[in-house]
Image (cartoon, grey):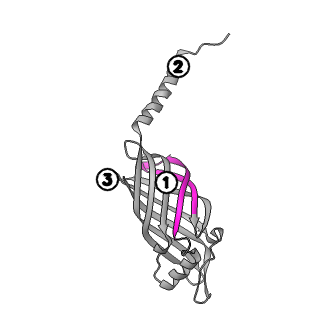
Amino acid sequence: MKARPTLAAGKTFLFLLSYQLLSLMSSAQVHFTGNSVDLVVSGTSTLHDWSMKSVNAECNALFIVNPSGSITGVQTMTFSTPAIGLKSEHSGMDNNAYKALKTDKNPTINYTLTSASVVPGANGTTTVKCTGNLSIAGTTKEEEIVATCKPNADNTITVTGTRKINMPEFSIAPPTFMLGAVKTGSDVVITFTMLLKRS
């Protein structure tokens, strides 16, 4: 003889169902875009540390946003920046870096999201762990990037993050300078701050 569902179990089911429906109703899919970024690529060499900066980028993202403006999910996201937009304080270093990045055949650095997990933080911030395909110098690899998203009063979102990249894994020969006398390290660190606006 099968046991009948209890009244308490029925109430629990209805509560969970109502909670899920309210969550769906209170959140919305919102498209955000951004075309400027503070992007810094930094590394080491046998002479001194170095860095290259860019302020040009294009980002398109579809976020799930709750009424307070915090991100509760990420549906899609693409990011691209022109490789020659990276500039240091020395044109010779820039030219060698562009050769290493093979910018003549691969003018952009791209990242396309494949999945994301979201962890709420303090003061409305959200930590987003992104998994996606990163394309540099003609090589594409799956990379995980962790970003912090902070909603602003004007309905924009500030996105910050950092990621260490090993150049040889992308078939990039670490650039050399001064006829090979100065050699750069194999790892670089990418740090970014981007402002995304509702579109």
Tell which circle, 3 or 1, labels the residue nearer the N-terminal end: 1
Graded by Cα atoms within 10 Å as few (under 14), some (14 to 19) or many (20 or more), the crowding at tag 1 reads: many
Q: Which mark is residue 10?
A: 2
Is 115 included in the stretch rendered in magenta?
Answer: yes
Q: CA distance from mark 3 to mark 2?
A: 43 Å
Q: Quadrant of residue 112?
A: bottom right
Q: Quadrant of residue 165?
A: bottom right
Compared to residue 170, the image places residue 121 above or below, namely above
Label 3 sits on what residue type?
Asp
Compared to residue 131, the image places residue 177 above or below, namely below
Q: CA distance from mark 3 to mark 1?
A: 21 Å
Is 167 included in the stretch rendered in magenta?
Answer: no
Coordinates of residue 170 in the picture (x, y in percent): 63, 68
User: Residue under circle 1?
Assistant: 77
Tell which circle, 2 or 1, labels the residue nearer the N-terminal end: 2
Coordinates of residue 121 in the picture (x, y in percent): 46, 48
Q: Residue at x 51, y 47 (%)?
A: 118
Q: Which residues are magenta?
A: 107-134
Q: Residue at x 40, y 53 (%)?
A: 32
Q: Quadrant of the N terminus?
A: top right
Label 1, secondary structure: give it: strand
Q: CA distance from mark 2 to mark 1?
A: 40 Å
Compared to residue 9, the image places residue 194 above or below, namely below
Label 2, secondary structure: give it: helix
Graded by Cα atoms within 10 Å as few (under 14), some (14 to 19) or many (20 or more), the crowding at tag 2 reads: few
**Number of residue marks:** 3
Relative to the observer, which residue lies in front, 137 or 143? 137
